[in-house]
Image: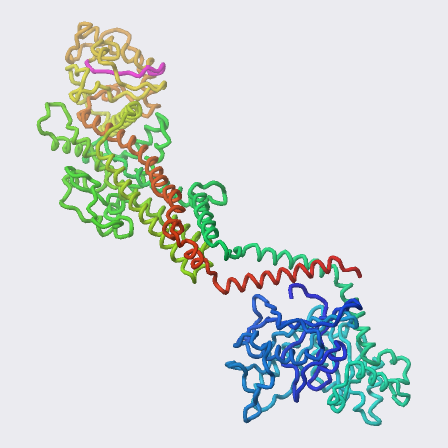
Amino acid sequence: AEVDLPRIAVIGNQSAGKSSLVEAISGITVPRSSGTCTRCPMECRLTQSSPSEYWKCQVSLRLEFNNETGKRLSTIREYKFGPVITEPSLLEDMLRRAQLAILNPSVDHEHFVNFNLKHLKASRDGAVVPPLGSTKQLQFSKNVVCLDLSGPDMTDLSFIDLPGIISNVAPGEDRHNIDLIRNLVQEHIKGNCLILLTLTMRDDIENQSAAFLAKQADPQGHRTIGVLTKPDTLQYGEFAPWIEVLENRRHPLRHGYYMTKHPSPSELAERLPYDAVRRREQEYFEDSSNPWWKNDRTRGRLGTPNLTKNLSKLLSSLIDATLPKLRRDAASSRQSARAAASVLPAPVSQTNPTSDLLRLITTFSTEYQNYSNGTSNTYASLIQNCKPEFEKFKVRVARTAPDFRPYTVKEEKSGSITWEDEVSDIEDLEGSEDDEDGLESESEESEEEEEGEEDASHERLNPHEEDLDEHPHRSRRSKRGNVYFGNHRKESHAVSRPNPMDTIFGKKGPMYVDQVKKYISGSLTRELPFNVPFSAKQGLIHRAMASWEYDALECFRFIRAAVASHMSELVEEHFGRFARSGLTDTVGSIVQKLIEHHEEETIERIRWLIRLEHRPFTQNQHYLSAYRDKYLSKYRGARRQKVVANQPSTQSQSQYSPNPQLPSPVSQNGYPYVNTAIPYGSDGSRPVSPVGMAGYPGQNGVAPNGFYVQMPNGPQSRSMHDKLMSSKSQKHKQTAPPLQPQPPQPQQPQQTHHTPDLGPVISQLTAAGFPVSSKSDLERLFASNPYEEEFFVMAEVRAYWQVAYKRIIDILPLVIDEDFLCAIAQRVQETLINELGLSTPDATDKAKEFLSEDPELVAEREMIVARLERAEDVWEKLAKFKP
């Protein structure tokens, strides 16, 4: 039961008169036969009706236990058995049929409603042959036959009659029945239960198992009521011990004992009516020779009417004591039943199944659309699963940044300053211009950490390297999904011929400036001197982007899996109850084909997107120029520190003497000449001098000492410029005409003149991170750069990669979102309607066939509805009940 309602359980040993007691209380006739009469529990629910109403009874079957395992069912079902009975004489046979239905669970209980009991047969050994083709007839069952009795002479009372406790079994019966009955009794007499203990006076109380079980369940005797039966069987001299029991002096109980007298076997054979039986009982106790009647203290405890009246009072008292808790339990049970009913799908309409199926499709499609849009926290999971994959794609692409080193392999091996340290130093001086700087440094560090795993890393980061004269991302896969469905690692090693760039730079790792110079030289054909072929820059760009297609498809693979998983869950949620009709599998197949269709389109769109990057192009000139200048400065500064750090300052100054010839204001590659020695100024100006400014001594152009100089525009840098130029100007006045640069002159005898103090300039440069400690170090700072042309190529390639990187990390998620997630959401409803045939003339028949529900679901819905009705009924009655 949903609520532990107060109740009365009638227990007793076999043949203790328990069935007669039940008849006396309820006014009905129960089935009788030799041996144990009650083979399953029988619950009697008595209600007093108005005098104008007639007697009636409804028999029901309540299935609480699995007959095979004996375990309680997760859901309790109660079925009405037959029509309402208005003639008491018909009830006994109906109870026999109901008990047969309980004992033969393999046969539909409806078949027993009109079963002819005369057709029951017994085998040669006396056992009953299972009726109606039953596979097996149980000897006992824990499931219940219920009787709802009402009449003007009834007392409001409910009790359950349990099978009599046995110590032995009949020949051919299972001895486990002894324990089954004991366990059944013990389970029923727990909780808010008054134990009506039937004790035959033909045996001592100590010998009756029912008394022992009642003592176990109620040690203090607070819930037990003793009923002494068969007093007419006592012989002379046997009355005294039972008088002590009736007076509650032996085996005392809180509610004491009652005594009833029921028909003897001969009287039962007469089939006396109920009123006649009660008159004979009254006559027996009022006999003056009867020792029970002589005792005034026990006279009120004699006879069935006194017992029934007091049982009703005791049950009412128990209800009053437990009413607050009962109301709380009833409210909780009602809420639980409502919750169980709310999660069940509504029953399918038999009149308009097409409308119901369209509603299911619309609800399913709308819910997936909500997931694809991430409209609220409820539908955020799909987008939340996609975002980390887009972030991973961003990191993978960031790790493909060209790792140019502004010094030669030999200089790298002999130096003590690493490229990461130099980049870090420059970033500290300049400050981060872009959020991506930190990501780039992380990329470089990650690549250094993975040098020991070159082959494995190459497989992961550059699986698509090809010849420069081919598209580096052109697919060599003829079957759909090879890149996507997991066998890409095997094919990633398949290249048509060795890549010539690998012989110069290696398959993975940094690209040193001398290697870049060699690569550029190998790309020259008909170009004029001092021109770098565009194909060389394009090849370097392709090398950096070689793994982008692989990385993009890897990203999409995870997105596709997330969408498929969400779709599978939604199909099961909305169509799972129609698995037996095939609708679940049909919808799942349609959705799978839709996903595969858009998967193919999205993969082709991704490859198309990557093909766009094969031809370098951008109109974002400002961003490209800014990053080109940034990396050009980084490369120059890093090389300067490397070269200066590798040469001791104690060497002769002549070893680092500048070229006496003035450099052209325009370099051989056509770019404006930029001095590699001077960093950015504090105002962020870049060291690119206008061509028109070149050649003017003492200004941003040609210095008096013959060096081409570009100074930044910041105030601090101007101070260094003025002091430096002042020092050089003094020397220039003694050695050369003002406007003509002269070659170095032999050292002159020391002149007596004032030399500007260069200490502050050297101190500022040192503080800025330049390895300058003397005037000779300051001279070396202006040494010429033999790799200026390569630096421009490296800076331009690195800058364009940055532009393409910024572009691809945004466009790829947009392509996947539009061509896959949103495209499926836009087409799923229309596709399901068409594929399920709802736009055809026979749509109604198809919908009806698809919407045939699982019988178990139908039964579960009926059971939950019945449970809800019972819970509502109990809650309403308890709410209205007044003690």
Q: What residue is drawn where x is 64% and y is 78%?
A: 94
Q: Residue 647 or 93: which is nearer the viewer?
A: 93
The quadrant where residue 296 appears = bottom right
> Would residue 384 be visible to someone looking at this image?
no
- Residue 658 location, x and y as percent? 18, 18
Whether residue 309 sits left or right of residue 662 in the image: it is: right
Whether residue 210 sits left or right of residue 432 in the image: it is: right
Q: Residue 874: within the magenta?
A: no
> Would residue 269 be visible to someone looking at this image?
yes
Q: Quadrant of the N terminus?
A: bottom right
Whether residue 630 sits left or right of residue 114 in the image: it is: left
Whether residue 333 sits left or right of residue 827 in the image: it is: right
Q: What residue is drawn where x is 57% and y is 63%?
A: 862
- Residue 749 location, x and y as percent? 19, 10
Q: Residue 359 or 170: which is nearer the viewer?
A: 359
- Residue 220 location, x and y as percent? 76, 74
- Residue 266 location, x and y as percent? 75, 91
The quadrant where residue 192 appears = bottom right
Q: What residue is drawn where x is 31% and y is 46%?
A: 554
Predominant SS of the magenta segment? loop
What stretch of residues is rendered in magenta?
706-717
